[in-house]
Amino acid sequence: MMKNKQELKMIDEIIKSIGDVENVITSMHCSTRIRFTLKNDSLANVEKIRKIDGVMGAQWKAGQLQIIVGQKVGRIYEMMTNRYPLNADGEVADDYDEKQKLSASLILDFLAGCLSPALPCILGGGLMKGFIALFVMIGWIIPETDFHQFLVVVSDAPFYFLPFLLAYTSAKKFKTDILMSMAVAGMMMYPTIINGGDAFQIGLLSIPLARYSGSVIPIILSVWVLKYVYKYVNKVIPDFLRMLFAPIIVFFVMGIISLAITGPIGFYLSKYVADGVNMLFDFSPIIAGFVVGITRQFIVFTGMHLSLTAIILSNIENNGWDPLIAIYGISALAVAGASLGAFMKLRKKSNKEIALSACISAVLGITEPGLYGVLVRFKWPFISASIASGIGGAISAALGGRGYMISTPSVLSLAIFGDTTLIVAMCYVISFAVALILTYAVRFDEDTEKSEKALETEKKLVLKVKDTATNKDTPVASPVRGTVVSLSQVGDDTFSQGMLGKGAAIIPSEGTIYAPVTGTISMVFPTGHAIGLVTENGDEILVHIGIDTVELQGKGFEINIRKGQRVKAGERLGSFDLDFLKEAGYDPTVIVLKTSVERELVESEEKNTTPENPIYTIV
């Protein structure tokens, strides 16, 4: 019940922060994000959304406001649409896509946007197929039995009927009719077509019979064309004839286009891409494996890795196997090794915790926390992981490492590599060890500030490691000069009742703000009235200046630090105009809270305080 209340609160804050329901044209969701198209983009406060508890991030992309809430997105979206009258399938402006210039970046964005929502099905089916192969190999499942056939059907369905999944996601991406798109997929998946044989000859038009099951590019191309065909047909046909004749015309036109033009183009394009990858690996597997491996971290960093999933799927569909996914798994273990090497080299407790947690996540196939929180931040681990990934990739390619199905490459999914499992496992160990040794061998500056991306990806950690054995008491000083009062005396129930955490309040005598602890700035509210810090022990501190001062929209506040910056206790953070707050009728009381729940605090008995004096100690 408490969890539902927290999620409803998050939903209410999101809707309020995007300009309320009236500002929403359409809403939808993919595997991790709620996506809004808004009437007035300026009404959305992205920085405020990023600070909402439960939100992992927010960004503008391709005309949409994307709010990242993780794998619970389906449940959150359902709760949101039940709570608010949102248009879940509304139209956006006609010139939405036309405003974007055609470029390689745009093509990759569309490809990734069509594939991303389908990845849970694809990766889940692939991992299941891997476990089935493993259990058959060790004798836990007898092949060709009814139970085995049942498992094969269940795990293979997302791949065999992949065009239907991509028809749905592509229709969402291209903003066209979903059911029409799935009907086009049905044309391409019709048994007469996919069973092969001689091409249909309709006058001068030849329609090849190709196997589209498991394909990616043919259906995406076809749905992209459908968008314009559907829009044009509905535009030129009179309203009273549209319901009857528009579907007939769209079906006929798209039948010709998808089966005679876009389908074959996509089919052969996929085949040529697969052949090109094979030629590269046949020409020099060592060079190819090294290049793919050493560039993998950069590709993930630039966000192009999702679009490359299409190449892996094409290779598996055309050849029955793919060499890239083995190298991608090797790269994940290189991130894990570099993160562990950083853990061994780093001295600061908070940095060590992030590095060790990132190592565990990378071993399980989730590399973003390690990439942004360790590799990119400290730079040398990035180079180490890239070199290790290149070496492991070269060895894997030279020895024939390959995957026979797609899944998140990790130690849990080794079975997807079939008869090359031992080769890939050996390369996992090599890349892990090389990255660890190289990272540990060179000193690097661990005072480097965290980027916003690093702070955001820490939320994706599978396991956050806390070294409680070495936790030290943390004194929390007053951020202002003034008089300490009990938190219960604050005129706001949110603070006085401890809803946000325990702490103390100070009635300020001047307006200079100082850092109450040594640590990293984790949040600076856009209006300047609230600042978040994380200590080296991992304690989270919130400094909140005044009651309801958010309403001033930053007037009277001057903050001189930024998110991700490291500060020392007593360092000046900014200032506020104390007289202005009082004249405007606002209570200027400064609240200092410990918002993390892992440890307790002991209050100081000193009432008249300065930035040099602790007001409480976290123990």
Image: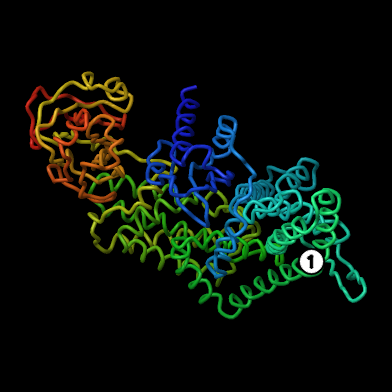
- Residue ID at (25%, 46%): 520
In the picture, measured across the screen, residue 506 lies left or right of residue 429, that is left
Residue 413, above or below 483: below
Image coords of residue 602 (percent x, y): 18, 24
**Could you say which quadrant of the image residue 93 lies in?**
bottom right
* Residue 37 visible here: yes
In this rendering, is residue 389 above or below 457?
below
Q: Which residue is mark 1?
A: 257
Q: Tell whether 558 sits left or right of 297.
A: left
Residue 460 appears in the figure: no
Total tally of numbered discs in the picture? 1
Q: Give the residue at x 18% y 43%.
A: 518
Q: Which corner quadrant of the image does residue 27 belong to?
A: top right
Counting from the top left corner in percent of width and height, residue 515 is at 17, 41
SS at mark 1?
Answer: helix
Q: Amino acid at mark 1?
A: Ile
Check the image and name the residue furthest to the bottom. Answer: 283
Front residue (pair 81, 565): 81
Q: Could you tell me residue 554's position as x and y percent? A: 27, 42
How many C-alpha atoms fall within 10 Å of the one at disc 1: few (<14), some, or many (≥20)? some
Q: Quadrant of the C terminus?
A: top left
Q: Nearer the viewer, residue 369 or 580?
A: 580
Left or right for 558, reference 150: left
